[in-house]
Image (cartoon, coloured by chain):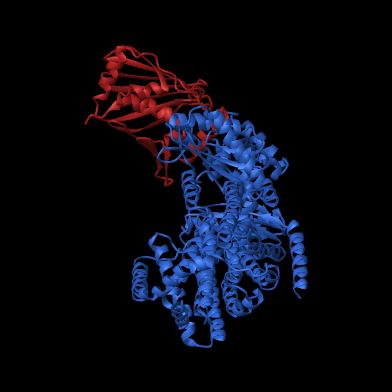
Chain colours: A blue, B red
């Protein structure tokens, strides 16, 4: 029988290793953002992964005088512009705008929204010329007069005006600066997509080495980097580091604990077998279930080590001298099984939480625990040395027993403590929300990084894109045509005051259809010459001044239509690419809106448009909605997890009183942990909520053992000592995570680590069993 | 009004903005210092102006007129009344342009438009008697005596030199009478200022 078990186990391990060897490991941050339910949000998530937004790196330089910072900015930009890793390097210097203006100039009659047949009538031309004359009288006249002969109707100026109005950073010393002038700013766009973390990492390395060269031995200037790519890289580093470090430290610490307790290398190895099997099975299961394994899941392995080793500890420690391991197991198995089941209930809440990342952690833990307990139950006893008994028990037991005996004295103080913590929580919740309402609380980024990013974005003047209209179409042309139809409506709404302005991809590249319409609207040279002559009467312009204008219009009438390739190398191309995106099926055009005051009216009006359905997105509303949906989901699943645990306990203990006694220490621990977290200034997130559920799931193991009747005082001694060691192991596993730099791991680690100790201590205080008497008898005999 | 800035943008781009550091002006003579001190004493000045612009693209010069208001140390208003009303208000580093007939209003941060900045600073710093600022943009020299003086401003920055050859400001005692701008292409403009009788 045991041979079969060992054989099966070995085959299972080989299978797991095979699966793992073919597993892809990822550190994609979006795994810890909620899954996006709507198609429009899908577009945004895609953008976050590979769109232009994902390729931006924001650079801040600070710590020196504006002159030094500006100089560093110019040198850094100049050198980075020669690097192939970057598509664009912008620091406010007017580099590369020639190409933009060249494109606008050459295509002005195809691009200008003013081009209609009426635009070149006598009256309209007269009006344009009078305006030009007024402009000549202003300080700008000096500048405008150079292009007047080619463009008297002012198309170029109209186009430039259209592109203006976007918020731009402040200027100082010829480069971009933050408003207060402390920080010089650059915006880089990488060639590689944001999800290509290796390429992002090398781009960042290029920035850092170039900066080091530019700054030389002047160490006063500090380089700050932010942006999706930077975050991906730093998070990968952190996750990699944390996953290895914590798993390694947990293993070493727990190995030390086992060695200390059992003084046997063989037993140490045996003790780690269930955990190692569980970890391998967990990774293999996640790999099969999710297609890839996230780095954070591996980091969570530390908790599995802490929790999974418990089973071996229960077995090893509770084996009485001259009793076969199998017999011992039969005794503790019902309690252990119930403990495992409650833990699984807890981790199930993670499995169904709606976050792919959290679900991975749930599956990893559940499979890991089941395999760990199975190996402990059916494989370990056969491998244990004959006549094995844990020596440490005899040395520690008296102290533990003494403490446990006295623990109930603390009942009243504990009740007072819990009551006051409860009051504190109620008072604090009156003052302000204890729960974070922001989606960013789920971000795997540390708060400091989020703050720096926010500051840099503010400085750059990147407007918070709150309202966005997204329209999907079969090809780019159809998407641009749809944008043009929407733009007409938005133009009318702008005049009515429903919004201040908007940005459309068709501003940079009109649809071919629109370009043809404009071309057709241009008059023939004869008609234009005649109209111009009439319009020029009594105006002080030199005769024949506008000959180039006639030639330009004639040329524009037959010039080839412009396409995306004409924009290559301009800053306008970058803008176009961020607003017109190729998707898996077809294309999406996005129009970003500024200064929206009446979103309902806009939604109503664009809904009336024929053609592809346009969706108005309120990003803030959507993300709040999203967060609330997921918090609601997490709450529901945590409740269900909690209810499942209670039902499980009822089914097994069959006594409301015992269920209450088992749960009371856990409830006390949850209240105290919550209070400590809140008092430490934490805004509670979904991750804390999951952590609190795990406190119940993990802590129930302790209270169940306390609740379990023991036959003899020796059994009880052994049981208590095993709980102590198991608790220390769990605490090592979760407690280590509270030192993690990944907020998710930190939140769960600190919550469960603290909760595990409290559950044990509170169980000792609150659960008193009659079996204490035999111990006294035993002692009196001695 | 906005088109004004757009035009400037275009031009700056065409010229390929370079960022040469400001050259040090020649050591100012005692006379310039004296004149600047005199001008610096003026706290408020109001006047009417007539501005004539001679341009090669026009067969007859363009004539504009209106009022000027200066308040020390750096507030300057130019209200053009003819041929079409238009006003410019300069306050610290912001230039606000307003066209009431078109109901347009636009504020410009001077730092973002170095050529416009050089233009307005040539006049404002002269009125304020602010030689250090003036010297940042121009090489300054002076002819004449207290009753009839003529300042000659030559831009130091290449961007500005591409647009303007020289600015001549002449006046008497602490009053500016004419401002003449000679542009690189040969066009020029002359503004004559008369003090308000009140």
Q: Up-down: is A317 above or below A151? A: below
The residue lying toward the viewer, choosing from A105 and A659, is A659
User: Is residue A382 in view from this perspective?
Assistant: yes
x%, y% of residue A397?
49, 69
Identify the residue at the far left of this view.
B198
Kindly indicate the quadrant of the structure image that contains residue A275: bottom right
Q: Up-down: is B3 above or below A468? A: above
Query: Residue, x 40% and y 31% (percent of image)?
Result: B64
x%, y% of residue A82?
64, 32
User: Is residue A146 in view from this perspective?
Assistant: no
Total numbered badges shown on the rendered structure? 0
Quarter holding the C terminus of chain B is top left
Quarter holding the N terminus of chain B is top left
x%, y% of residue A9?
74, 68
The residue lying toward the viewer, choosing from A39 and A498, is A39
The residue lying toward the viewer, choosing from A440 and A391, is A391
The residue lying toward the viewer, choosing from A19 and A135, is A19
Q: Up-down: is A226 above or below A661? A: above
Kindly indicate the quadrant of the structure image that contains residue A137: top left
Query: Residue, x 28% and y 17% (percent of image)?
Result: B35
Q: Up-down: is A655 above or below A351? A: below
x%, y% of residue A115?
61, 46
Identify the residue at the far front of this view.
A782
């Amino acid at each position: 029988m045991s041979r079969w078990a060992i054989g099966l186990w070995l085959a299972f391990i080989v299978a797991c290793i095979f699966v793992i060897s073919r597993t892809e490991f990822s550190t994609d941050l979006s795994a810890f953002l909620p899954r996006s339910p709507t198609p429009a949000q899908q577009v945004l998530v895609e953008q976050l992964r590979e769109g232009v937004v994902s390729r931006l790196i924001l650079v801040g330089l600070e710590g020196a005088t504006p002159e030094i910072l500006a100089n560093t900015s110019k040198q850094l930009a100049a050198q980075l512009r020669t690097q192939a890793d970057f598509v664009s390097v912008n620091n406010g210097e007017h580099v590369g705008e020639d190409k933009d203006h060249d494109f606008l100039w050459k295509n002005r009659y195809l691009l200008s929204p003013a081009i209609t047949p009426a635009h070149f009538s006598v009256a309209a031309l007269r009006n344009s010329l009078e305006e030009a004359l007024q402009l000549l009288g202003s300080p700008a006249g000096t500048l405008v007069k150079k292009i007047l002969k080619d463009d008297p109707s002012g198309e170029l100026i109209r186009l430039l005006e259209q592109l203006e109005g976007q918020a731009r950073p402040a200027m100082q010393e010829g480069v971009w600066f933050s408003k207060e002038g402390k920080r010089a700013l650059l915006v880089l766009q990488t060639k590689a997509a944001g999800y290509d973390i290796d390429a992002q990492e090398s781009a960042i390395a290029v920035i850092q080495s170039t900066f080091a060269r530019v700054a030389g031995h002047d160490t006063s200037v500090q380089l700050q980097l932010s942006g999706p790519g930077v975050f991906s890289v730093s998070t990968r580093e952190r996750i990699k580091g944390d996953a290895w470090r914590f798993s390694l430290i947990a293993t070493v610490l727990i190995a030390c604990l086992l060695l200390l307790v059992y003084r046997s290398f063989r037993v140490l190895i045996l003790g780690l077998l269930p955990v190692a099997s569980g970890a391998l099975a967990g990774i293999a299961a996640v790999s099969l279930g999710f297609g890839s394994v996230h780095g954070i899941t591996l980091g969570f392995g530390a908790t599995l080590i802490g929790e999974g080793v418990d089973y071996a500890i229960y077995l090893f420690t509770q084996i009485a001298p001259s009793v076969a391991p199998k017999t011992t197991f039969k005794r503790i198995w019902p309690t252990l099984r119930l403990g495992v089941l409650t833990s699984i209930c807890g981790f199930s809440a993670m499995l169904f939480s709606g976050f792919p990342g959290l679900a991975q952690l749930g599956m990893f833990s559940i499979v890991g625990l089941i395999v760990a307990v199975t190996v402990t139950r059916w494989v370990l006893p056969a491998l244990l040395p004959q006549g094995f008994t844990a020596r440490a028990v005899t040395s520690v037991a008296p102290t533990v027993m003494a403490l446990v005996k006295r623990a109930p004295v603390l009942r009243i103080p504990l009740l007072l403590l819990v009551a006051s913590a409860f009051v504190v929580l109620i008072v604090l919740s009156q003052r302000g929300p204890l729960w974070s309402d922001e989606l960013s609380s789920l971000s795997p980024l540390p708060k400091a990084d989020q703050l720096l990013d926010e500051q840099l974005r503010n400085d750059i003047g990147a407007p918070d894109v709150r309202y966005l209209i997204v329209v999907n179409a079969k090809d780019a042309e159809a998407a641009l045509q749809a944008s043009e139809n929407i733009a007409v409506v938005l133009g009318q709404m702008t005049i009515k005051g429903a919004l201040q302005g908007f940005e459309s991809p068709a501003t940079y590249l009109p649809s071919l259809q629109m370009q043809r319409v404009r071309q057709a609207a241009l008059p023939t040279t004869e008609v234009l010459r005649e109209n111009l002559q009439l319009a020029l009467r009594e105006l002080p312009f030199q005769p024949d001044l506008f000959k180039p204008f006639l030639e330009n219009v004639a040329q524009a009438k037959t010039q080839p239509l412009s396409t995306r390739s004409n924009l290559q190398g301009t800053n306008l191309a970058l803008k176009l690419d961020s607003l017109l995106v190729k998707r898996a099926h077809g294309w999406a055009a996005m129009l970003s809106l500024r200064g929206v005051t009446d979103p309902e009216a806009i939604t109503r009006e664009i809904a009336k448009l024929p053609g592809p359905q346009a969706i108005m997105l309120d990003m803030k509303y959507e993300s709040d909605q999203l967060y609330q949906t997921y918090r609601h989901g997490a709450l529901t699943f945590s409740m269900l997890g909690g209810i499942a645990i209670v039902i499980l306990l009822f089914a097994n203990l069959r006594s409301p009183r015992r269920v209450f006694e088992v749960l009371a220490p856990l409830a006390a621990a949850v209240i105290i942990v919550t209070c400590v977290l809140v008092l430490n200034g934490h805004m509670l997130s979904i991750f804390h909520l999951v952590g609190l559920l795990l406190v119940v799931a993990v802590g129930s193991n302790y209270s169940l053992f306390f609740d379990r009747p023991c036959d003899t005082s020796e059994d009880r001694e052994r049981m208590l000592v095993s709980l102590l060691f198991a608790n220390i192991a769990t605490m090592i596993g979760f407690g280590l995570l509270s030192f993690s730099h990944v907020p998710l791991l930190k939140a769960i680690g600190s919550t469960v680590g603290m909760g595990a100790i409290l559950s044990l201590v509170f169980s000792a205080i609150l659960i008193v069993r009659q079996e204490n008497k035999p111990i006294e008898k035993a002692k009196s005999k001695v | 009004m906005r088109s004004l800035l757009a035009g400037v943008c275009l031009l700056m781009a065409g010229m390929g903005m370079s960022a040469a550091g400001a050259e040090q002006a020649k050591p100012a003579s005692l006379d310039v210092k004296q004149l600047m001190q005199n001008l610096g004493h003026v706290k408020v000045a109001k006047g009417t102006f007539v501005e004539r612009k001679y341009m090669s693209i026009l067969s007859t010069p363009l004539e504009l007129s209106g009022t000027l208001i200066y308040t020390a140390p750096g507030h300057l208003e130019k209200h053009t009344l003819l041929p079409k009303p238009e006003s410019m208000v300069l306050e610290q580093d912001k230039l606000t342009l307003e066209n009431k007939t078109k109901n347009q209003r636009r504020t410009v941060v001077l730092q973002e438009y170095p050529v416009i900045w050089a233009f307005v600073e040539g006049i404002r710093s002269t009125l304020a008697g602010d030689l250090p600022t003036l010297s940042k943009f121009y090489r300054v020299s002076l002819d004449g005596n207290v009753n009839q003086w003529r300042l000659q401003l030559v831009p130091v920055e290449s961007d500005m030199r591409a647009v303007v050859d020289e600015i001549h400001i002449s006046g008497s005692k602490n009053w500016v009478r004419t401002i003449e701008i000679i542009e690189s292409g040969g066009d020029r403009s002359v503004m004559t200022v008369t003090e308000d009788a009140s």
